[in-house]
């Protein structure tokens, strides 16, 4: 910082030459030097100049310390705000939902080949639970609801059976299977034949 000389050739405040009167415009201190010798005047001038410079340097140090404290407080506040934001993001950011996996099983009996049991109870959901099972029998009769349901077809044919499952976050998955219904072939019924035994001739 450039030091200002507090002893100009002529003081702007008193308008007297500094040879007879000394006035420090920096610290507003006036001193009458009438009757003092040149050595005393020079000594007083040097002392007051040193005092003014010391005051300015002290002010500079105080300003630097104040700026350093402000920077430290600003850095501390920034760290706290960043930590709060990170905690909020970790605590309140929702975890992406994992979709369920549909599993379809069919059961039937030879005694009633047109009746099937649809079983979707083996379907799974890793991060929740399945709340809906929707079946399409594939014969145009309409959808069925439930984990395990039964359905009877009107005639033998090949049907595409579909299952849709939905979890508690509304994510879905589907599975299909093709099943052929064939009526068992009954063996033909034959009429029993009468068998007659020929009589053997009597011996003579």
Image: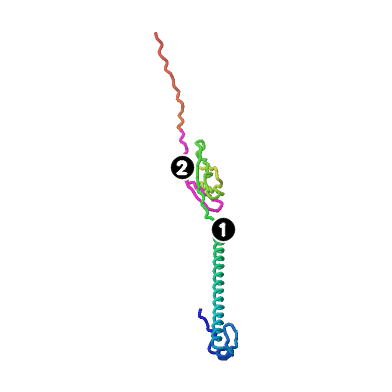
x and y percent of residue 60 in the render? 54, 76
Around disc 1, counting alpha carbons within 10 Å, would you say few (fewer than 14), some (14 to 19), or many (20 or more)? few
x and y percent of residue 73 in the render? 56, 67
- Observer-nearest of 75 and 201: 75
Tell me where the magenta segment starts and ends, as one range.
160-186
Q: CA distance from mark 2 to mark 1?
A: 51 Å
- Our reading of the magenta stretch's main secondary structure is strand
Give the residue pinned by disc 1. 92
Around disc 2, counting alpha carbons within 10 Å, would you say few (fewer than 14), some (14 to 19), or many (20 or more)? few
Residue 181 in the image: above or below residue 71: above
In the picture, the quarter occupied by the C terminus is top left
Residue 180 in the image: above or below residue 44: above
Nearer the viewer's eye, disc 2 or disc 1? Answer: 1
- Observer-nearest of 164 and 68: 68
Residue 77 in the image: above or below residue 120: below
- Observer-nearest of 187 and 100: 100
Question: What colouring does the structure picture have?
Answer: rainbow
Q: Could you say whether the residue bearing mark 2 is in a helix, strand or loop?
A: strand
x and y percent of residue 116 in the render? 52, 41
Q: Are circles 2 and 1 on residues that touch, CB within 8 Å? A: no
Q: Could you say whether the residue bearing mark 1 is in a helix, strand or loop?
A: helix
- Residue 110 magenta-drawn? no
How many discs appear?
2
Give the residue pinned by disc 2. 180
Q: On the picture, is 195 further left or further right than 25?
A: left
- Residue 177 magenta-drawn? yes
x and y percent of residue 111 in the render? 51, 35
First of labels 2, 1 by sequence position: 1
């Amino acid at each position: 910082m450039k030091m200002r000389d507090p002893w100009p050739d002529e003081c702007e405040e008193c308008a007297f030459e500094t040879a007879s009167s000394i006035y420090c415009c920096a610290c507003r201190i006036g001193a009458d030097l009438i009757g003092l010798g040149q050595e005393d005047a020079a000594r007083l001038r040097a002392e007051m100049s040193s005092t003014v410079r010391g005051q300015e340097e002290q002010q500079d140090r105080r300003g630097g310390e104040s700026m350093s404290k402000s920077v430290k407080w600003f850095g501390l506040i920034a760290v706290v705000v960043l930590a709060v934001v990170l905690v909020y993001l970790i605590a309140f950011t929702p975890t992406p939902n994992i979709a369920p996996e549909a599993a379809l099983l069919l059961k039937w009996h030879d005694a009633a080949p047109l009746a099937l049991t649809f079983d979707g109870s083996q379907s799974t959901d890793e991060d929740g639970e399945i709340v809906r099972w929707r079946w399409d029998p594939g014969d145009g009769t309409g959808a069925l609801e439930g984990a395990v349901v039964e359905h009877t077809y009107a005639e033998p044919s090949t049907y595409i059976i579909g299952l849709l499952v939905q979890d508690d976050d509304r994510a879905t998955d589907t599975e299909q299977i093709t099943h052929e219904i064939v009526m068992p072939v009954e063996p033909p019924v034959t009429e029993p034949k009468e068998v007659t035994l020929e009589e053997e001739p009597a011996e003579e």
